[in-house]
Every structure is written in structure tokens, then in C-alpha cells.
Amino acid sequence: MSPSELDTILQQLLLERDLQAEDVEDFLHPDYKKLHDPMLLPDMEKARDRVIDAMQSGEHIMVFSDYDADGIPGAVVFSDFFQRAKYENVSFYIPHRHDEGFGLNCDAIDAAVEKGAKLLVTIDCGIADVKEVEYANEKGVDVIITDHHEPGNKLPEAFAIVDHKRKDSTYPFPELCGAAMAFKLVQAILLKERFGIKEGMEKWSLDMVGIATLSDMVPLVGENRIFAKYGLDVLRKSPRPGLASLFKKLNMDQSHISEDDIAFMITPRINAASRMGKPEDAFRLLSTQNSLEAEKLALHLETINNERKGVVASLVKEAKAHLATRQDLPKVIVIGNPEWRPSLLGLVANTLVEEYSRPVFVWGRDGDGTLKGSCRSYNGYHLHELMSGASECFIEFGGHAGAGGFSLTLPNVARLEGELSKVIENLEEGEGKLESEAHHIDISHIGEKLWSTIEKLSPFGTGNPKPIFTISAEVKSAKNFGKTGGHLEVILKSPEGRDLKAISFFTTLDSIGVPLEPGNKVHVLAHLEKSYFRNRPELRLRIVDIIEI
């Protein structure tokens, strides 16, 4: 392609992202120095000073984090900070997903009291824990909440609440993930007191912020784009033994780690630890300085991730069998079983959303008998708004635009689907839907120059979707590949004689619905990507859809 053609494509892609002219440069060249001042966050001064006072007086500090791929990396950010400061009077508490559930709990506060802690810092949770913070206050434990979730009608009476979603917040960018909020607190502390930490050393924790940002479905614009970009840069050079062991186990080239590698390889293994009951194992893997321990933990996480896959596949099969008996599905699907464990239901919801093309709510029963579940959005419907419209059905609910969690009583299970389906009727008229336009290009235009142009827009994710291209071409060959033949590879014939590979994971020749015999002509809708599997760079297409001509 000519330079002018490449520039035209870049300008079209930028235009689709609704960027103002003055924002284009920042989008194309994210700059760490343009992160907002952490002191602009609500209660940051109080939180910063309380942590500094605790460290200077030798108090025991407990860090309580959520158990997912946002909260655990956020806890590692604090672990890094305390290790660099050589402060050892600290402990970390990650709740058991099934037995303790989401958010601060009284058992953790009791554990803090037993350790003599007078300060507890939450990461990626706490904004809804009014009663638990009250209990901590009664026990003489100050609570600093760092969170990024939507607050309820009443804020906890914590010592400090650092959350840009507070109604009184004037922070310029209200879309950070939990680990980024933890990093902001570390930044604020270091602005006042270095504790012997060399200038700039905290940037080595950006690998954790990057993983969390790319895992937590926050929009990859503004500060999140900076964190994702620099997070990937640090990740590619990170000296963490745990990451090195994990990359080796997964045959991944660390120097070319991408956002897709995070989403499909790293995040599932962090989450598998908590879903299968051992969230501290993921924390230990990411925070350990011991290479031998790292190797053992990487092997352990891979083992439990494989166990998790089997259990989820069984749940999905059961859910689909039930939905197949229903003649007409509503605009929102609600499905569950008291025998299902809530810790795995977000994965089930993801699969059902892809299968049925609508928001899905999946519920089960946790360790104390409460009905809890996970929900996932479809086509940009804002889940928090959706759940707010049916709030009388829930005991509690929360989350983001694209993913969330909830609890409810058994009598409300039967009516939840109908109520949500009514609410979504009104959301359809808002700005709830996301639309992607495919760009038509000739197969001969696909090459390194086009890839370099597209790469300027990366990292891709929520709020910054991968460009979709439509290529008309002749099929040269098609086959299933993988250990069980569960993936599809199509070789497209180019007039210049240069073949192009197009792949689709978890799709087969039988399921694609289009005849792919040699010589057939097709329209392929796809993303352009560069694979470094087994250290071999390969430019290829990732299939979104195939249409017979």
C-alpha cells in the first residue's frame, strides 16, 4: 500500500474513535508523564499520610484485596512497594471466592486484629462494605478503601475512601481499575516520602497495573491507555521469576507479549486460582523472588486452570441443554442452579453471551447458602444501569458496564429475567450499542506496512476495539488444527502467489457454516494480528466471520 493509502486508513480508524483533534497525538503516543496527579483523587492526602504514619511508627498493616485479575495484581503493587521500602510488618489477605465472597468481611478484620493491625487497606473493593467498616471501627482498625466500583447510596465511614466514582470526586478520569488506584496511592506516598526507594523504581510495578487494566474491561482510553501501553512495555522486560516461569510453561515469547496474550493466557490463570479456591497462589506466583517456588507455582496454576476448564465446560453444557428446551428466549437471559458455584459463573456467562447474543445473568449458591451470580453484557448495554432498573430484585449488585456480580433471594429468581428484559427496552434507545464497521481491503494490501499502521492504535480492548477488515479471496485449503482438532485454519490464495493464513479458535469446518473447499470464493471479516508462537513471527488474520460469495 502507498503511504497515502495507509494514512487514509489510519485517519479513518482514528475518526471512528471519536477523538478530538487535540487528543490524537496523546492517543498515538501515550506519555507516562501525562498521568494525572494522584493527589487529585478524593481522600488521597488522608490515605497517604495514614500509611506513612503507620510505616514510620512500625504499625502492622494488613492489605485486603479482591481475588481476581485486578485485585491480585493490585496487591502485588503494594507488595512491591513494601519490599522496596524494606517494610516487613505487613500481611496480605485475599478472601476465598466461594466461602467468603466479594468484598471486605468480618473474618478478615478479626484476622487483622489478631495480628495487631491498626490499619487495613483495601484494593479493588470496599466501597459497598458499610457494615464491615463499622465493625472494623469498633475493633479499633482504621480502614483505607481504594476502589473503583460505583458507590451505593451510603458511603462506609472509613478513615479514607479513595475512589474516583464517588459523587464528590473531581478526578479528571473516572475509569481506572483497582490496581491502578493502588498504584496511585503508592505514587502519592512516594511523592512525600521515598522510604529509601530510588526515583522511578515504582514503574517496575506497571506490569501488574497493565495486566489488571487489560483484564478488567475498563475502557482503554485516557490514563488507561497509558497504563496499558507502559504496562506491556514493562511486562516484556519484567524480571519477576513468576512471570518468567509462566511464560516458559506456556511457550510464550516475553519480549513480544501482547494484550491478547494477557486476555487469553495470563488472566485466566490468575483467575483460575481464585475460582478453584486458591487465590493466594496467584499472588505468590506474581510476588515471589524465588525461582524454584515460581516454577512450582506456575505448574500448579496450569494444573488448576485445566481443572477449571473441565468444570466450566460441564456447566456450559448443562446451561445450553436447559436453554434448548425454551422456545423463545427473552432479551436478557437469567439461568442458574443451586448446585453451581458462583466462582465459575462469569466464565459460563461469557460463553452464553457469545452463543445467544444478549446479556446473560448466571446464578448459583455460595458457601453460606446465599444465591450469587455473575453477569456479562452484550453489544454495549451498561450492566450497572440495567441492574439499577431492576434493583428491587437484588440483595446487592455491582460491577462495570460490561461485567458485574449480584446476589438475590430465591423468590426473586423467577421474576428477574422478566424485569431485566423490560428495563433493557429503554436502554436500547440510549448509547448502549457498539457498532464496528469493516474496512474493505485487497488481500495484496496485507503486509508489514499495514500492520505497522494498525499497531499505532494498540493496545486494543474495551473502548478501543481492533479494526475489522473485509477481504475477498479464494480458498486454497482449510483444515482443523490443535490437539483435539478444535480450531480452524484457512489458507487464502493471493493473486501474487503469496498465501495468507486465517485462523479461528474454537471453530471447526463443521461449525463454520460455509463450504471451504479449494477454489471457493469468500468474504473474510477479520482482525490483522502478528503471532510470535514458538518465537516465529507470523502475520495472519483472526477470523471474525466468513461469508460465501
Image (cartoon, rainbow, N blue to C red):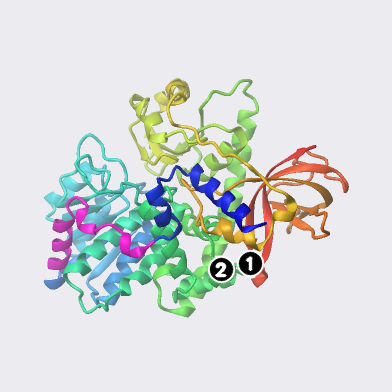
Query: Dots 2 and 1: beta carbons under 8 Å?
Result: yes
| Residue at point 63%, 39% (across, down) | 317
Amino acid type at mark 2 = His
For disc 2, the neighbor class at 10 Å (few under 14, some 14 to 19, many from 20) is some
Question: Residue at 40% of width from left, 29% of height from top?
Answer: 386
As drawn, 386 above or below 257: above
Residue 2, how many percent across, how many down? Answer: 65, 57
In the image, residue 486 above or below residue 359: below
Instruction: Estimate the x, y position of residue 282 in percent, counting from the top left.
Output: 44, 63
Provide the secondary structure element on which disc 1 rests. loop
Mark 1 lies on residue: 532
Res 87 seen here = yes
Earlier-in-chain disc, 2 versus 1: 2
Residue assigned mark 2 = 256
Residue 271 position in % (x across, y down): 47, 55
Residue 66, visible in the rendered structure? no
Which amino acid lies under the numbered mark 1 shown in the image of this protein?
Answer: Tyr
> Is residue 303 magenta-colored?
no
Q: Residues within 10 Å of mark 1 (few under 14, many from 20)?
A: some
Q: Report the front residue among 380 and 52.
A: 380
Find out whether residue 43 is within the magenta segment: yes
**Structural distance between the alpha carbons of marks 2 and 1:** 7 Å
Write the start and end of the magenta stretch as one range: 31-54
Residue in the foreground of this view, choosing between 277 and 33: 33
**Relative image position of residue 45 (x, y in whole percent):** 15, 58
Residue at 56% of width from left, 37% of height from top? Answer: 353
